[in-house]
Image: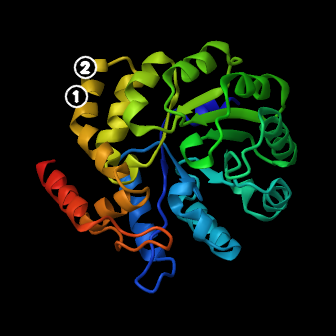
Amino acid sequence: MSLTNVLRGTGVALVTPFQQDGSVDYAALDKLIDFVLAGGVEYLVTLGTTGETPTLDKAEKKAVANFTFDKVAGKVPVVIGIGGNNTKELLHDLDNFPVERAVAVLSASPYYNKPSQEGLFEHYKALAAASAKPLILYNVPGRTGRNLNASTTIRLAKEVPNIAGIKEASGDMTQCMQILRDKPEGFLVVSGDDNLVLPQIACGMDGVISVAANCFPKDFSNMTRAALAGDYATARSLHYKLLQGYDLLFAENNPAGVKAFLAELNIIQNVLRLPCTPLSAGLHQQVKTYLQSL
């Protein structure tokens, strides 16, 4: 079955809540999952980069993933994030993480190494061959320092078995349209830019893996569903309602922005692991004011 049927709509890249001592707050994670499911999101992403995975150790990652799978218990699909810049280590992780419990693996492109397009192709080819579940590419050049260009994405989609989709977060609308024009039938294309979801769905995307859906799950997933149904009047209304919220989410750091919102909603504590820190006081006040306006 194509992932375009399974992962259509809004997926939420879950944050990892922490207690004041920096340990994982599973009670808050439980509360967050209830909140986003009640808000109507279609699926969850565990161990995405919004979950501060670069600061979680392997045991914590496995525990967070298994907690999420146990909590959801098959009610909605769950995608697991396994990405990084050491291909050999990721091949090991694909064998040792609970991949079999997911519907797909989301893998962010290598960061810092700045591989060539051929390096990116071979990296993803190796991961796809080793993955027990379909692989979703994740292009986020603002974080990785290297763009996975449209021609490489299409080459992977057409030439490499088990590569089933892409989360495209380049912010480059022309690149997105080139992928949508040239992709093979059944290849999933979702947005990784919350503020661009509406126009990207109009161009043909299947939905979004979202940060904003952590804190605005009802409005955001309704906006996405409306756009996918061609009801652009409703989608536009919700999009513009949330537009300032998108700016606040990403003004300083992700997930500092979304954790500030979730703390104000009394779902998690406003704790991050270094090198990330909570929002500055002035920006946090803007978060409070915006929430009151909603």
Q: What residue type is labelled 1?
A: Ser
Q: Position of residue 208 (x, y in %)?
A: 49, 36
Q: Mark 1 points at which residue?
A: 237
How many labels, in total? 2
Position of residue 30 relative to residue 230, above or below, is below
Any part of residue 146 in sight: yes
Q: Position of residue 2 (x, y in %)?
A: 68, 29
Any part of residue 64 in sight: no
Q: Residue at 67% of width from left, 69% of height from top? A: 62
Q: Where is residue 24 in the image (x, y as percent from the top left)?
A: 51, 77
Left or right of 196? Residue 274 is right
Find residue 5 and report its image quarter: top right
Front residue of this view, candidates 35 and 207: 207
Q: Name the residue under label 2.
A: 233
Front residue of this view, candidates 149 and 289: 149
For the residues marked 1 and 2, what is the alpha-carbon distance in whole angstroms?
6 Å
Position of residue 196 relative to residue 28, above or below, is above
Work out which residue is located at the far top of the displayed protein and give it: 181
Left or right of 150? Residue 271 is left
Q: Where is residue 85 in the image (x, y as percent from the top left)?
A: 74, 54
Q: Residue at 39% of width from left, 47% of height from top? A: 213
Protein image colouring: rainbow
Position of residue 240 relative to residue 210, above or below, is above
Front residue of this view, candidates 223 and 30: 223
